[in-house]
């Protein structure tokens, strides 16, 4: 069994665990994990850890992450993304490019963010998303996050496409909801692509169906 990492371009519609299971079957290896969950809706960089590198999970936690995502205004969902159930609707008239840029700039730097219920965090041993799917809510403590870059890429209301560079523990869906609220509307994420984790970039990610042993690379920081 080969030790190392695989930089995968995760397709939409699969959980991170689905990708791990696929890689185990494809490569004939049991000892594979991943370094950082992606939502089923999301695409992009998912780092797989193979063999002895599964012990190095904590080394990846401090890496900054980069995303390109789309906030769709007008509807808030229970999950924070477009696949959830709509729980509130609100108009988005009179929202300008200037206003969006002003709100984006207000998030730059250090702030506190409350993790969403639809997240992989645990409460008394159970994943929050598992509780959320049963209609349960639990108190979550705010966590410090750092937004290094948040900028508008394209505006075509109700869609706001943006780029985000952030610290560990930042939830794109929660940020998008907060931005929508500060714009005087509601919204949810309709698309997310993780473009980078630390030094690992989307340009070098392997499509899932092209996973091969020769794509495994040694772990370097």
Image (cartoon, rainbow, N blue to C red):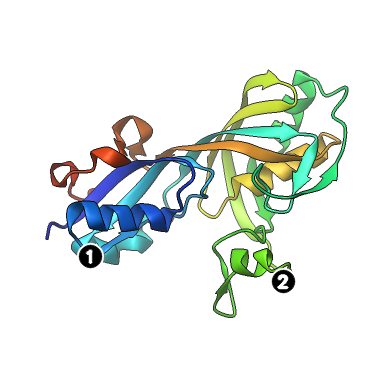
Residue that sits furthest to the bottom in the current view: 124
Can you give x and y, in whole percent of width and height, for residue 19 in the image? 36, 52
Of 206 and 135, nearer the camera is 135
Can you give x and y, in whole percent of width and height, for residue 176 in the image? 68, 41
x 62%, y 57%: residue: 144
Q: Is residue 40 left or right of residue 52?
A: right
x 77%, y 44%: residue: 76
Residue 221 in sight: no
Residue hosting label 2? 138
Spatial CA span between label 1 and label 2: 35 Å
For mark 1, does the 10 Å Cα neighbourhood hold few (<14), some (14 to 19), or many (20 or more) residues? some
x 80%, y 20%: residue: 96
Residue hosting label 1? 30
Can you give x and y, in whole percent of width and height, for residue 149 in the image? 57, 34
Can you give x and y, in whole percent of width and height, for residue 20 in the image? 33, 56
Q: Secondary structure at mark 2?
A: loop
**Hey, which quadrant is residue 72 in on the image?**
top right
Indicate the quadrant containing the N terminus: top left, top right, bottom left or bottom right: bottom left
Residue 48 tag number: none
Mark toward the start of the polypeptide (1 vs 2): 1
Vertical relation: 55 (above or below) 201: below
Of 119 and 20, nearer the camera is 20
Q: Is residue 136 left or right of residue 193?
A: right
Q: Secondary structure at mark 1?
A: loop
For mark 2, does the 10 Å Cα neighbourhood hold few (<14), some (14 to 19), or many (20 or more) residues? few
Of 207 and 146, nearer the camera is 207
Looking at the image, is mark 1 or mark 2 nearer the viewer? 1
The answer to whether marks 1 and 2 mark residues whose Cβ atoms lie closer than 8 Å is no
Vertical relation: 153 (above or below) 52: above
């Amino acid at each position: 069994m080969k030790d190392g990492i695989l930089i995968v371009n995760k397709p939409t519609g699969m959980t991170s665990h689905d990708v791990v299971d696929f890689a185990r079957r494809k490569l004939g290896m049991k000892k594979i994990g991943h370094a950082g969950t992606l939502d089923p809706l999301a695409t992009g960089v998912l780092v797989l850890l193979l063999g002895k590198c599964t012990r190095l999970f904590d080394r990846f936690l401090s890496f900054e992450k980069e995303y390109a995502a789309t906030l769709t205004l007008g509807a808030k969902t229970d999950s924070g993304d477009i696949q959830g159930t709509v729980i509130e609707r609100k108009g988005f008239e009179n929202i300008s490019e200037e206003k969006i840029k002003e709100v984006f700039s207000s998030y730059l730097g250090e702030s506190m963010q409350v993790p969403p219920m639809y997240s992989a965090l645990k409460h008394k041993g159970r994943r929050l998303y598992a509780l959320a799917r049963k209609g349960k809510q639990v108190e979550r403590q705010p966590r410090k996050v750092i937004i290094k870059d948040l900028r508008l890429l394209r505006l075509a209301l109700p869609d706001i496409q943006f780029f985000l560079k952030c610290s560990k523990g930042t939830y794109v869906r929660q940020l998008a909801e907060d931005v929508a609220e500060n714009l005087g509307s509601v919204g949810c994420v309709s698309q997310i692509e993780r473009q980078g984790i630390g030094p690992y970039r989307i340009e070098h990610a392997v499509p899932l169906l092209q996973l091969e042993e020769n794509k495994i690379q040694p772990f370097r920081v």
